[in-house]
Image (tube, helix red, strand yellow):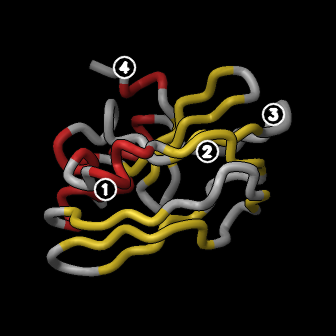
């Protein structure tokens, strides 16, 4: 099980696992539950330059279609092909096998993101 307190979060319900210059991004269990059963995931191509706040993908569920926003500036280093092949991983394991993309960022790029307590307060508010 992932240590949820070690992650950073965005107000768009994304989680970020930061390991040096590599940041793994997924959507939170809260977002996955609100979406319902995820049936389609579209992710950016490896090598794509992304800018914080821009749409970089799409998550479609039985309830709605949601956009995936870039939480940071960076370059897409890897996408999770398993999620593209089996979108239900976003629901069943959002913090483990259901991650979406890995990006390479500059040092300090993740400053200002929410910690777990601030994110939980946001979802309960």
Query: Label 1: which residue?
Result: 123
Q: Badges 4 and 3: C-beta atoms under 8 Å apart? A: no
Q: Nearer the viewer, mark 1 or mark 3?
A: 3
Q: Earlier in the sequence, mark 1 or mark 3?
A: 3
In the picture as drawn, the residue positioned furthest to the right comes out as 106
Q: Earlier in the sequence, mark 4 or mark 3?
A: 4
| Category of crowding for the residue at label 3, using alpha-carbon neighbours closer than 10 angstroms: few (below 14), some (14–19), many (at least 20) | few
Q: Quadrant of residue 98?
A: top left
Q: Give the distance between the C-alpha atoms of the residues marked 1 and 4, in whole angstroms.
A: 18 Å
Q: Residue at x 74, y 38 (%)?
A: 104
Q: Which mark is residue 105?
A: none
Percent x, y of residue 1: 27, 19
Q: Earlier in the sequence, mark 1 or mark 4?
A: 4
Q: Earlier in the sequence, mark 2 or mark 3?
A: 3
48 lies left or right of 114: right
Q: Give the distance between the C-alpha atoms of the residues marked 2 and 1, in whole angstroms.
A: 15 Å
Q: Nearer the viewer, mark 1 or mark 4?
A: 4
Q: Residue at x 81, y 33 (%)?
A: 108
Q: Earlier in the sequence, mark 2 or mark 1?
A: 2
Query: Label 4: which residue?
Result: 3
Q: Which mark is residue 113?
A: 2
Percent x, y of residue 85: 31, 52
Query: Label 3: which residue?
Result: 108
């Amino acid at each position: 099980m992932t240590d949820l307190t070690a992650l950073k979060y965005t107000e768009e319900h994304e989680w970020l696992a930061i390991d040096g210059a590599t940041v793994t991004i997924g959507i939170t269990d809260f977002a996955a539950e609100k979406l319902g059963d995820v049936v389609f995931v579209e992710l950016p191509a490896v090598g794509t330059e992304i800018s914080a706040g821009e749409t970089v993908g799409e998550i479609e569920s039985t309830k709605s279609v949601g956009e995936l926003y870039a939480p940071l500036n960076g370059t897409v280093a890897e996408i999770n092909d398993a999620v593209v092949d089996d979108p239900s991983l976003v629901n069943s394991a959002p913090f483990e096998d259901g991650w979406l993309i890995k990006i390479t960022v500059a040092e300090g790029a993740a400053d200002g993101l929410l910690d777990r307590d601030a994110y939980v307060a946001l979802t309960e508010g």
